[in-house]
Amino acid sequence: MEKLIIEGGAKLNGEVRISGAKNAALPILCAGLLAETPLVLTSVPALKDVASTIKLLDTMGVKVLQEADKVTLDASEVGSFEATYDMVKTMRASILVLGPLLARFGSARVSLPGGCAIGSRPVDLHIKGLQAMGAAIHITHGYIQASTLHLPNRRLQGARYYMDMVTVTGTENLMMAAALADGTTILENAAKEPEVVDLAECLNKMGAKISGAGTDVITIEGVEKLSGANHNIVCDRIEAGTYMVAAAMTGGKVKLLNARADLLDAVVEKLRDAGATVTHDDNSITVESNGKLKAVNIRTAPHPAFPTDMQAQFMALNSVAEGVAKVTETIFENRFMHVQEMQRLGADISIDGNTALVKGVEFLDGATVMATDLRASASLVLSGLVARGETVIERIYHLDRGYEYLEEKLTQLGAKVRRSH
Ligand code: EPZ
């Protein structure tokens, strides 16, 4: 089992290039199923979740060519419309093939994602939205069996659908399904995350007619077919946020290249409240700090509010900041898995329901800790960067799901971190 070994205390200085966004790449790769001619993507991050998605598409008959960060998808000869339990259990975002398979082929058999570390994470809104478009859906033996064969021209029908919870992949699945539907679909209470916007931009390049992405009402006018296109994946705002917190906590000056501050307003504001200096231009962000930060209250909510994917990172910041702060998680019901591990490092955190009270301590002390989910592992890395002595993080496959070349990028900034096999 691979581990990450970090010697705390080094300030981070220099430049780091932010990769393409994992949470944009995953839906956009699945959008490749919709196109009759090749879709060419650049800035696709080298992550385990991306590799899993490409493997899934390959099993369906999509021809995938990967050359560094460029991926070409040819879905002209798809023969299987199934995402098995083995696939979905390793990556729940596999659910994103459901909409495209139904839209283009009229049939899909996708395993229900099980629960995951951070919560039950049902997909009922994905299913209800597809049913609103006329899909016949049965849940049998843990699989979603979906079909449009009973519909006129075997096509989904445009519909108006209100999502009673803001769901990112739910919005993405339904947007992809609606792109080839017969008629117009209006998605209300849609997710406004930048990754939803990036998917809509890619779909429109492929010939879709989508408007309103980035607002809570998205209108999709169905078209007959979609073609391939060229699309560069938007930068990863969560990877950027993670390095920004690392710079602020260690007390250094770090410039993030290929980073957009306009995707991170809430995070930039909180870092400034904590006492870091944050400046930016159109495609870079610079964070400078003396390492002496003030604790900041955090409350997660859908974009553009403070992102749940940055909650664990700010828990780490608060654990060594001056003062006391409340961290409230409103999106997932169990996203405090990192707390027990951080307490092993000496953090003073108490949990009351979905709110954690964090009292800043003078020092964290290195220890062996265990990663439990992607962003929780990031908070352990951040804690290790400032802890006294050595921190060993086990089960770092969680990190490899969402952070490209993590130890290389951190080492380049001056951190003392290495991977042990
Ligand atoms: C996406 O997950 C991201 N993953 C998550 O990032 C992110 O944390 C999350 O959005 C929230 O921003 C990808 O984009 C691949 P949701 P998603 O559907 O779409 C409930 C990371 O670290 N819900 O927006 O699965 C759900 O239980 C990952 O990169 C339903 O009840 O999240 C949750 O409480 C972790 N029924 C809330 O809505 C549904 O049908 C938001 O979930 C769908 C969702």
Image (spheres, grey):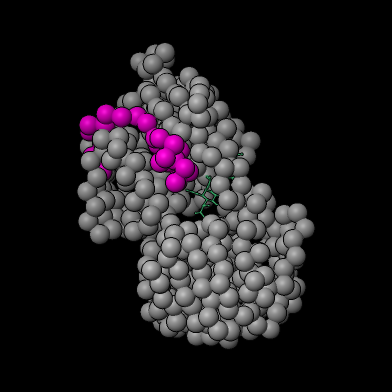
Q: What residue appears at the point 50 percent right and 34 percent down from the top-left corner?
A: 112
> Is residue 270 at all visible to an observer of this figure?
no
Q: How many marks?
A: 0
From the top left corner, tell me how far across and down residue 36 is, in percent: 25, 33
Q: Is residue 265 left or right of residue 255?
A: right
Viewer-proximal residue among 321 and 405 = 405
Q: What residue appears at the point 68 percent right and 83 percent down from the top-left corner?
A: 362
Q: Is residue 291 above or below residue 206?
A: below
Q: Quadrant of residue 125?
A: top right
**Which residues fall within the magenta stretch?**
73-97
Q: Is residue 370 left or right of residue 292?
A: left
From the top left corner, tell me how far across and down residue 239 is, in percent: 46, 64
Q: Is residue 208 above or below residue 420?
A: above
Q: What residue appears at the point 42 percent right and 65 percent down from the top-left corner?
A: 2
From the top left corner, tell me how far across and down residue 126 is, in percent: 52, 33
Q: Classify the position of the C terminus by image quarter.
A: bottom left
